[in-house]
Image (cartoon, rainbow, N blue to C red):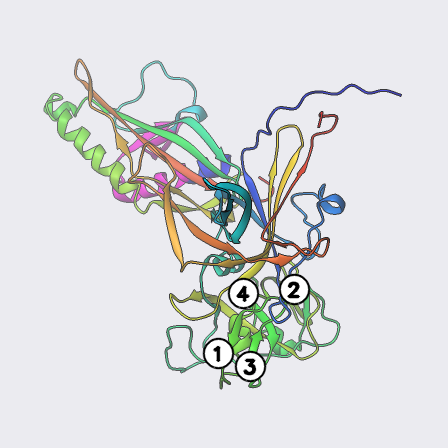
Amino acid sequence: MQNAKDSFYMALRARLATINPERTILLRGTVRPGILVEEAEAPFNQPPTDIFILRWLGLGVDMDLGSAMVAEECEIAYQTCGTQSYGGLDRGRALSEMDEELVAMLKPFHTPKLNYTATPPAAMLTQVFWDEPAFGPIAIQRDRLSRSAKVMVYSYQEQGE
Amino acid sequence: MAANWFSAPAPVARRVRAYFAPVNRAAQTPVLFDPAEQGRFNLEAPPAPWIDLGWIRGFKRTPKSKTSPVLAGIPAGTLEQVRETLEAQVSFQFLSWTKLTMALATGSQHMNLMAPASGSSAAADGAQAVPAVTPQSGSSAIFIALAATDAASFAPGSIVALDVDYTGQTGFVGAPVAGAYVRQALTDADYIRRVTFNVGLVSQVNSTGITLAEPLPGGIPAADAKLQAVTGFVDREGGSFYQEWSALFVMEGSQGERIFFYYPRLQTMTGAEEEAVPLDEKHEAGHSRVLLKGQFLALPVTDPLDGEHVLCYRSFLPASMALV
């Protein structure tokens, strides 16, 4: 299951770097594409703005198939206060931009499954695939706009996993 | 010596597993399943020649036999019952798409799409094929010995079909499963390999031959069998051929009890049909799993025990130490 989670995240990260190379985050001294997995970083008091945060939630397994199918629910949360140069008045536009980037990142709705514990990452036999995102409503906290989208990510368990 | 026992309630089972065995079509001889001798087999490794079809869903048995009363007296009362017709149907959905499940779920020939020869003209069920190659001695059900030049034409991941050349015969063709009934002589030398169930996935290639991921259903290749590459499968709506198989369905209860439904002869009774089931019931517009739907008609056999004509045997192996 971890290989599917890693592959999903790495696919989105690579796509984001192409879609909007300027959306980055300085994390542990390194500038990276502006997307991270919450469970793989130190806890933060206030989620950082203008990046995408992946949070893994539900899990289901269909064991009746020749290869067990795993469904993992991923919540992708993001928030923005707009830009300083506009005094935050562009926060609605900034959130729309992130909505569009997320939709673009999720297409196509599949990516090859790789084992990222190997160096270089080892290609596996199957594809990780997912549904269209289900967007939640905008949440407003003072000047901060936030939204999350939920995506069901599917994969097949391969031998040795 | 004494032992404790318990009163077992109705079996609790979650799913049904299906197994296939080929019927000898020419002799109308099904494959036997003896629940007394074979009933405790490992569900992952059925006894030969049964082949695992995996878990199925929507398993439904529908008895269609008709009985009539024999009336006597005034006013008439039922004196006896007689069985007028003998009929039973089974329906379910396969959870996988394989050569076997596709073929069984379709009401016609199921053909292999042979790798096309360079420049061959297009055809709906596959163009003229790349010429077959001849296995060498030393082949087994899982390793096909080939000349080095022939082996080089295959790669890991290739699908192959192995059967004899078609030489103008009529009747049932294909081994070990009859894949078609030829009514009049054809001209395609590859026809039997087009309909054969003797297919496999190549897992390894070297200069001495190819290794398959699983043994061929037909076992060790016949002396005159030949090998061809397959790119996929095709079936047609229409035609006059009905697939027939011996079927075994198993429900395993929570206490280890087993219910078997053994149909010696089962024929497909509908055309190819699919059912799309959403992966996420809350998100019906999302991904759907496409299941092969099958509806089957049970054909009778004569039970040598007492000469009765029967369609299905239902067996029950109780849980250990359950009262009976």
| A22 within the magenta span | yes
For the C terminus of chain B, which image quadrant?
A: top right
Q: List the residue tagged with mark 2.
A: B29
For the residues bearing labels 1 and 2, Cβ distance under 8 angstroms? no
Depth check: A56 or B240 in front? Answer: B240
What is the C-alpha distance between the residues marked 1 and 2? 33 Å
Q: List the residue tagged with mark 3.
A: B170
Q: Are marks 1 and 3 on the same chain?
A: yes
Query: Which of the 4 quarters of the picture holds residue B264?
Result: bottom right
Numbered disc 3: secondary structure: loop
Determine whether B201 is above or below A128 in the image. Answer: below
Numbered disc 4: secondary structure: loop
The amino acid beneath tag 2 is Thr
What is the C-alpha distance between the residues marked 3 and 4? 30 Å
* Relative image position of residue B231 (x, y in whole percent): 47, 67
Label located before the other in sequence (3 or 2): 2
Label located before the other in sequence (1 or 3): 1
Label located before the other in sequence (4 or 1): 1
Numbered disc 2: secondary structure: loop
Depth check: B317 or B104 in front? Answer: B317
* Relative image position of residue B4 (x, y in whole percent): 78, 18
| A88 within the magenta span | no
For the residues bearing labels 3 and 4, Cβ distance under 8 angstroms? no
Numbered disc 1: secondary structure: loop
Q: List the residue tagged with mark 1.
A: B129
Q: List the residue tagged with mark 4.
A: B158
